[in-house]
Amino acid sequence: MFGYELPGELRDLMRGCDVRRHPHYEAGTEIYLLQRGDERLYLKVARGGGLGREWLVLRWIGDRLPVPEPVWFGEEGGREFLVSGEVEGIPVYLVYEGDRSDAVIAMARALRMIHSLDPSGCPFSYPVEGKVSALEEKLGADGPGLSWLREGMPAEEPVFTHGDYCLPNVLVAEGELGGVIDWDFGGLADRYVDFVLAVWSLGYNFGVGEAERVWAPLFFEEYGVELDRERFRYYWRINELLD
Ligand SMILES: Nc1ncnc2c1ncn2[C@@H]1O[C@H](COP(=O)(O)OP(=O)(O)O)[C@@H](O)[C@H]1O
Ligand SMILES: [Mg+2]
């Protein structure tokens, strides 16, 4: 099923489990569902450093937020392996149309909770300066709009952010938050990093017009923020260029 060597400890952990490939085909990551009796665990396999970061972030969060319980992490043959507990629910982008409003409200409240977490000891930090530098490296300092990003850099107000706050990463069950998954970009950053991705994702999944008219206003009302348009535009541009 795997086509590569699994770490010995992981093989031990998986003994007696029914293993199924989860239908998720995002480039680079494989997801498996491990089931033993009533216990369900998820195994993520990927190359690069993302799962090592996710492991550290989940351990740092602990039980302070509804997130998967980190169970085991290891590396073998250039791959990383992360086992975590199940979060219940279905991703927000899959809810029935009539349930979207409850799901968006749950998603906004969850983000408020994430941003309110005590950030002390957080293992990662992603200052905007680093992103602008990376863009300058990628596109050249005189690349399109880069001087605007460099000169117009807003003073950051770092909080703990998710870093990939899109609809597939927030799970809801019966209109309530189940939990938030996929933490490999979790770390200190400006809260607008999560705002722009949430809005982009609402548009991608529910339609741009509807997102602008209905879902984004509802999201920010529930979060409880008067949006700073200029700040929003700034982080939106960074995201566009980083893609
Ligand atoms: N702990 C978990 N609980 C429930 N579902 C999970 C869990 N981990 C992964 N999944 C499922 O696998 C999918 C991909 O996992 P995710 O961590 O978002 O990986 P990726 O980084 O590839 O987006 C999710 O959309 C979800 O359906
Ligand atoms: Mg994901």
Image (spheres, rainbow, N blue to C red):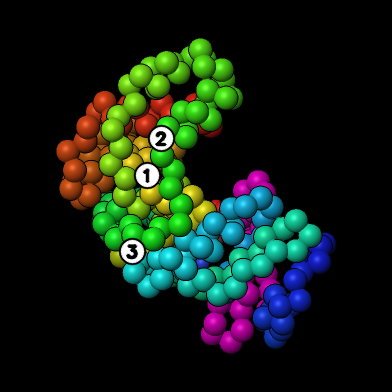
Q: Nearer the viewer, residue 197 or 96?
A: 197
Choose the circle earlier in sequence order: 3 or 1.
3
Circle 1 sits on which residue? 189
Rendered-image quadrant of the N terminus: bottom right
Q: Residue at x 81, y 66 (%)?
A: 5
Circle 2 sits on which residue? 128
Question: Do we see residue 110 in this rendering?
Answer: no
Q: Residue at x 41, y 35 (%)?
A: 128
- The magenta-colored residue range is 18-40
Circle 3 sits on which residue? 177
Within-10-Å neighbours for mark 3: few <14, some 14–19, many 20+: many
Q: Residue furthest front?
A: 121
Residue 35 got which mark? none
- Element on which disc 1 rests: strand
Q: Are marks 2 and 3 in contact (CB under 8 Å)?
A: no
Is residue 161 shown left or right of residue 13?
left
Within-10-Å neighbours for mark 2: few <14, some 14–19, many 20+: many
Q: Type of residue at label 1?
A: Ala
Give me the C-alpha separation between circle 3 and circle 1: 23 Å
Question: Measured along the vertical axis of the image, is residue 185 above or below residue 233?
Answer: below
Magenta stretch: residue 60 in it? no
Q: Type of residue at label 3?
A: Leu
Quadrant containing ligand 1: bottom right
Ligand 1 within 8 angstroms of badge 2 C-beta: no
Give me the C-alpha separation between circle 2 and circle 3: 29 Å
